[in-house]
Image: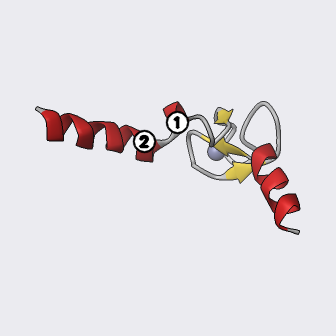
Amino acid sequence: MKLNFVNSMILMKKCVVCGKYTIKQGSCPYCGGEIASPHPPKFSPEDKYAKYRRKLLYS
Ligand SMILES: [Zn+2]
């Protein structure tokens, strides 16, 4: 059960415009925006803020 959940999460894409999750490929079914895998850190807003936090710490 847990493994099936993980597999479905890997297939999930996240809209970069409205932030909704979809398994649709190509564009967001809600707003037509660009969708991307939520896993690469470059698309994660949390990672972006973490980078800013690191910058603040070391500057
Ligand atoms: Zn969208």
Q: Give left or right: position of 51 versus 44.
A: left
Relative to 15, residue 8 above or below:
below
- Between residues 42 and 35, which one lies in front from this camera angle? 42
The residue carrying mark 2 is 47
Quadrant position of residue 59: top left
Q: Secondary structure at mark 2?
A: helix
Q: Are marks 1 and 2 in contact (CB under 8 Å)?
A: yes
Residue neighbourhood size for the residue with mark 2, other residues' Cα within 10 Å, grouped as few (<14), some (14–19), many (≥20): few
Q: Secondary structure at mark 1?
A: helix
For marks 1 and 2, the one nearer the N-term is 1
Residue neighbourhood size for the residue with mark 1, other residues' Cα within 10 Å, grouped as few (<14), some (14–19), many (≥20): few
Which part of the image, by quadrant, shows the N terminus?
bottom right
Question: Which amino acid, by three-letter code, is at mark 1?
Answer: Pro
Q: Position of residue 48 (x, y in %)?
A: 38, 38
Q: Give left or right: position of 55 versus 10.
A: left
Q: Position of residue 20 (x, y in %)?
A: 64, 52
Q: How is the image coloured?
A: secondary structure
**x 66%, y 44%: residue:** 14
The residue carrying mark 1 is 41
